[in-house]
Image (tube, grey):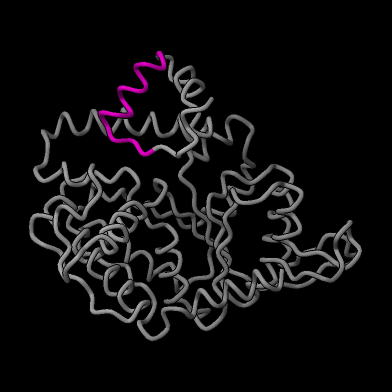
C-alpha cells in the first residue's frame, strides 16, 4: 500500500514544471464547467461528476482540487473498477498487521492517504453494496475503521466521485444506496462528450503534444491543417482519452516535426470531412450501444450479439463499418 500511495504522489509531481494539466477549451460547455468548478472548489461539499467514459471527469476533479483550500494536500484518485471486493476494502480503508493472511504490516489505505486533501472515487457506480455502506459511514462520521482494527481513525477528506452510469436507475433497481447517493451528489456537474465541444479539440491536442515532448526532451510537433480537420470532425466515442491515444500514436509515427493526416489512426483519417449530421447521430447511437454491450461481455462478440438481440455476423459488420476497436483476443468467445 505504501508503494501505491508513493506512486500516487509521484504522479502528481511529474508535470510540476509544466504546471497542473488545465481544463482547456473555450466552448460554452467548458467555460461553464470552469465556472462551476471554481465555485464548487471553495466549498467543502461532495461533488458528483457525470459523463461518458474518457470525457475528462478526472481532469475536472483535479481542477476542483487545485482551486480549493486543499490544493497543497494530496489528491488521491481511486478506480473503483480496479479491485475485487475483498481487496478493495483493504485498499480503500487500510488494514492492520495480521488482519488477514498476507497482511504483514499496517496499510494506510486510500482514504487516510487523502487526509487533508481530496479523495476522487472514479466509477463509483461499480462499488459493491457492502463497501457503499462503509463509505457512507466514513462520510457521516469522518472516521475510518481499517480492516482488523478495533478503533476508528479520524480523517479529514473532501470526496469527489464520478460515474458514467445512471445512478438514479441503479437506486431504483436496488444496486446503489440512495442515502449514499444523497451524500455524494450535493453538487452535480455534467461533463459533455468531446463530440459536443469540438472547438476544444485544438487546445487539448496542442497541450498534449507539449507535455509529450517535455517527457522525452523533444520539440513539440505541430499538427497539419488537414490532420487537425480530421481530429475536429471525428466523433471521438472514447472522448478525450481516445484523442490522447490517437495523438500519442501519431507522435510516434510522424517523421517530421509536423503531424500529418497519414500519421493518424485510420478511423480518424477517414473523418476529414464531417458526415451528414443525421447519419452521424445515428451511427454514434449504434456505436455507443455496441461498445456498451462489448464492454459488459468483456468483448466476447457472440455474447455481445445476444445481448443486443442481433446475429453475430451483423455485429461483425457494424464493428467493421463503425471502426470499433477490438482487443486482440476478442475473436475467441
Secondary structure predominantly adopted by residues drawn in magenta: helix
Residue 331 drawn at (x, y percent): 46, 28
Judge by depth and name the residue closer to the eye, 66 or 47.
Answer: 66
Give the left or right position of residue 233, taking residue 156 as reference.
Answer: left
Quarter of the C terminus within the rendering: top right
Judge by depth and name the residue closer to the eye, 190 or 245.
Answer: 245
Q: Residue at x 37, y 77 (%)?
A: 215
Residue 282 drawn at (x, y percent): 23, 28
Residue 127 drawn at (x, y percent): 63, 46
> Please, which residue is most extreme toward the front here?
255
Judge by depth and name the residue closer to the eye, 49 or 95.
Answer: 95
**Extent of the magenta region:** 311-325
- The answer to if 256 sits in the magenta stretch is no
- The answer to if 324 sits in the magenta stretch is yes
Quarter of the N terminus within the rendering: bottom right
Residue 223 picture quarter? bottom left
Q: Residue at x 25, y 56 (%)?
A: 29
Residue 122 drawn at (x, y percent): 53, 55
Residue 159 picture quarter? bottom right
Location of residue 268 with respect to 111 vertically, above or below: above
Q: Residue at x 52, y 83 (%)?
A: 72
The number of callouts visible is 0
Q: Residue at x 76, y 49 (%)?
A: 86
Residue 251 picture quarter? bottom left
Amino acid at each position: 500500500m505504501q508503494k501505491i500511495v508513493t506512486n500516487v504522489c509521484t504522479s502528481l509531481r511529474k508535470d510540476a514544471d509544466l504546471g497542473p494539466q488545465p481544463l482547456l477549451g473555450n466552448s460554452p460547455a467548458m467555460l461553464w464547467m470552469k465556472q462551476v468548478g471554481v465555485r464548487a472548489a471553495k466549498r467543502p461539499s461532495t461533488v458528483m461528476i457525470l459523463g461518458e467514459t474518457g470525457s475528462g471527469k478526472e481532469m475536472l476533479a483535479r481542477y476542483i482540487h487545485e482551486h480549493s483550500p486543499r490544493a497543497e494536500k494530496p489528491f488521491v484518485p481511486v478506480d473503483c473498477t480496479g479491485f475485487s471486493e475483498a481487496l478493495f476494502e483493504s485498499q480503500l480503508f487500510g488494514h492492520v498487521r495480521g488482519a488477514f493472511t498476507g497482511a504483514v504490516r499496517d496499510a494506510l489505505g486510500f482514504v487516510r492517504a487523502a487526509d487533508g486533501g481530496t479523495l476522487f472515487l472514479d466509477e463509483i457506480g461499480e462499488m459493491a453494496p457492502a463497501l457503499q455502506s462503509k463509505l457512507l459511514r466514513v462520510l457521516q462520521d469522518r472516521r475510518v475503521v481499517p480492516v482488523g482494527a478495533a478503533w476508528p481513525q479520524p480523517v479529514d477528506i473532501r470526496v469527489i466521485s464520478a460515474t458514467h452510469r445512471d445512478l438514479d436507475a441503479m437506486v431504483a433497481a436496488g444496486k446503489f444506496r440512495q442515502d449514499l447517493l444523497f451524500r455524494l451528489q450535493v453538487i452535480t456537474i455534467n461533463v459533455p462528450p468531446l463530440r459536443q465541444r469540438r472547438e476544444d479539440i485544438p487546445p487539448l491536442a496542442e497541450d498534449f503534444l507539449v507535455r509529450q515532448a517535455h517527457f522525452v526532451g523533444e520539440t513539440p510537433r505541430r499538427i497539419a491543417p488537414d490532420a487537425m480537420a480530421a481530429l475536429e470532425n471525428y466523433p471521438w466515442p472514447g472522448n478525450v482519452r481516445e484523442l490522447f491515444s490517437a495523438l500519442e500514436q501519431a507522435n510516434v509515427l510522424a517523421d517530421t516535426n509536423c503531424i500529418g493526416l497519414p500519421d493518424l489512426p485510420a478511423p480518424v483519417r477517414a473523418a476529414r470531412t464531417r458526415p451528414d449530421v443525421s447519419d452521424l447521430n445515428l451511427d454514434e447511437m449504434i456505436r455507443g450501444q455496441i461498445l456498451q454491450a462489448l464492454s459488459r461481455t468483456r468483448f466476447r462478440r457472440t455474447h455481445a450479439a445476444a445481448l443486443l438481440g442481433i446475429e453475430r455476423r451483423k455485429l461483425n459488420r457494424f464493428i467493421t463499418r463503425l471502426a470499433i476497436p477490438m482487443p486482440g483476443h476478442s475473436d475467441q468467445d
